[in-house]
Amino acid sequence: MLRIAVVGSGPSGVYTAQALLEQRAVPGVTVDVLDRLPCPYGLVRYGVAPDHEKIKSLQQNLRVTLERPGIRFLGNVPVGDGPGALPAALLPELYHAVVYCVGAATDRRLGIPGEDLPGSFSATEFVSWYSAHPDAAPGGFVLTARSAVVIGVGNVAVDVARVLARGADELRHTDVPHAALEALAESRVTDIHMVGRRGPAQAKFTTKELRELGALPGAQALVRPEEAELDPAWADPAGLPSAVRRNVDVLRGWAQAPPRELGRRIRMRFFLRPVALLGDDAVRAVRFERTVPDGRGGVRGTGRFEEIEAQLVLRSVGYRGVPIPGLPFDVERGTVPHDRGRVLREGVPSPGEYVAGWIKRGPTGVIGTNRSCAKETVASLLADTRALVARRPAGDPAAALRSAGLDPVEWPGWLAIEAAESALGARLGRGTVKIPDWDGLLTAAHGKG
């Protein structure tokens, strides 16, 4: 029998647990899925925008796996070297093997002057706020800005721009936390500038998400033709890959549309590279350098600059993995060195240590990509079975965690959180409403809500 710990309960962690249970080569495998949060599902719960209910429904598929016999959820179990955390070095004493599925937990930085001025935030901070992540900054966002700049042209950038542009009534039926809903109802934002350093054909958003921006009832999406025309593919996108061509076609339609008198405007800007955030006590504008294609798929600066007024800046230039205490880390890639999921220490596989998901391959792919990634790691783990079974882990890990001063939230505790969120929504005259803070979540998990 193998006892496996999977650290992380997002899609990569759940798919890893599923692959372990569905394999037939090694009977009697049991899996504990550990998460530092008391709630499962990772970015499906805390990264998918509240109005993307179809994607959020993936939680039901993940639930089916986490409720299977042989899998146990242990939330509120941080693994690391901070206060109250379980040192990673203790996991091999409790399990035959550990698979780390911790994702990419931080944002890439712009590395420009003024990046840390008040009013400048990572897009992840904004997403955490409207997704009710318990680590979100206290007080949340007060949306008194008139002009907001979103730096980046990927799907996360589209998400934050869309949430800024939506009316609160359009989000009332979702699980967005009540304080965020009230702040959005009071928002003064009228202009949202979504800015990329390259052209329309290089943008990373998907067509479905892009079209949603153009379908918002209270906002118009606008494109400056003179900027978009700098992209060689703009005039004739026929030779582009189909997904890119669809994006360009949508943007061409926006560029040709007459302006409408709506409350908000989403201004898509291209070929602008941020060089500084300007302001004294708070951000007041973003300075960009105009870029042009360099003929090799990139861009070069022109030495011409433009400032866009902004009292709110949301930086959305990608995720990055962070080191896991006790494990090797590739600083340049932001991943753990591995060979088909086996953790490498000085180039040699480390017995019993594995990775899957973004911490293994970087923040690439879609949610479904994690399934094949997990299967590859599980295949490596199963190939190592003979060496793994020779290890002799201690008794019940949950009891050991409690003895170490931790307070694991098991599946009934998570179900109690779900019930408390349903009750909160009923009291507010809404559907399910997320509990946004640690105290509230843990109180609910212990049936004291």
Image (cartoon, rainbow, N blue to C red):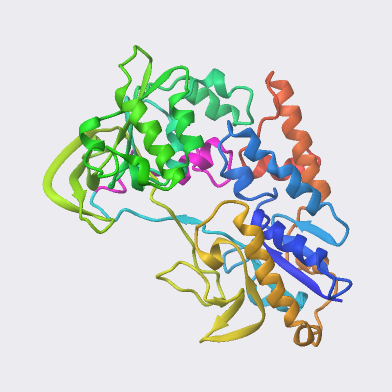
Examine the rendered structure and indicate whether residue 143 appears above or below residue 288.
above
Instruction: State the residue at coordinates (66%, 70%).
Output: 376
Range covered by the magenta-colored residues = 114-141
Locate residue 101: give its quadrant: bottom right
Pick the front one: 137 or 147: 147
Q: Residue furthest left?
A: 303
Q: Left or right? Give the position of 71 relative to 347.
A: right
Q: Is residue 163 above or below residue 326?
A: above
* Image position, residue 68 (x, y; %): 85, 55
Left or right of 386 on screen, residue 209: left
Residue for point 40% across, 31% down: 250
Location of residue 254 (image quadrant): top left
Left or right of 352: which side holds 186?
left
Q: Position of residue 311 (x, y in %)?
A: 30, 32
Asked if one can make out residue 390 in the rendered structure from this viewpoint, the answer is: yes
The image position of residue 362, as x and y in percent, is 50, 63
The reply to whether the magenta stretch includes residue 294 is no
What secondary structure predominates along the stretch shown in magenta?
A: loop
Q: Quadrant of the C terminus?
A: top right
Any part of residue 449 in sight: no
Vertical side of 254 occupied by 388: above or below:
below
Q: Is residue 115 magenta?
A: yes
Toward the viewer: 94 or 274? 274
